[in-house]
Amino acid sequence: MSTDKSEQRASAAERLRGWFTGRLPGEWVDGALDVKVDREEITVIVPIGEPQVADGASDAEQAAAWEGRSRRFREETRQHRIEIAQEAEHTYRRKVSWGVRSG
């Protein structure tokens, strides 16, 4: 029985999503991780919690709150994410890049 490359990529992404889900602290994540895999890189998109803004906040205020939340997440988690990425790079022989998604 043969599997095509798209199925192999899907199962690799699923395994990696499971691995990263197990490695990331639960308080970092607000939803399911999005993990993409190609020949050279693993991209992990972490969903983060929505910032609290005032009722009726302008688009500019909401955008600034999201930017602040994203920046804070990156700063506060940097060292731990580096450690996780190094472990993944050693295990899976691919570079790891990170992103955040909110909302």
Image (spheres, helix red, strand yellow):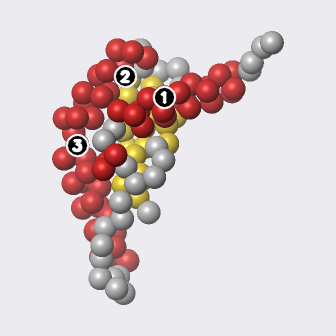
The amino acid type of the residue labelled 2 equals Ala
Q: Where does the image place residue 2, in percent across and percent down from the top left?
A: 78, 14
Circle 3 crowding by C-alpha within 10 Å: few under 14, some 14–19, many from 20: few
Residue 84 vertical placement versus 46 (above, below): above
Q: Label 2's element?
A: helix
Q: Nearer the viewer, residue 39 or 78?
A: 78
Q: Where does the image place residue 21, in percent across and percent down from the top left?
A: 42, 37
Residue depicted at x 44% and y 63%: 103
Cα distance between the residues tagged 2 and 1: 9 Å
Quadrant housing residue 93: top left
Q: Disc 1 marks which residue?
A: 16
Q: Disc 2 marks which residue?
A: 88
Residue depicted at x 69% and y 26%: 7
The residue furthest right is 1
Circle 2 crowding by C-alpha within 10 Å: few under 14, some 14–19, many from 20: some
Quadrant housing residue 69: bottom left
Mark nearer the N terminus (3 vs 2): 3
Are the residues flagged by discs 2 and 1 in contact, CB closer than 8 Å?
yes
Residue depicted at x 52% and y 20%: 39
The amino acid type of the residue labelled 3 equals Thr
Q: Disc 3 marks which residue?
A: 77
Q: Label 3's element?
A: helix
Q: Where does the image place residue 5, in percent across and percent down from the top left?
A: 69, 21
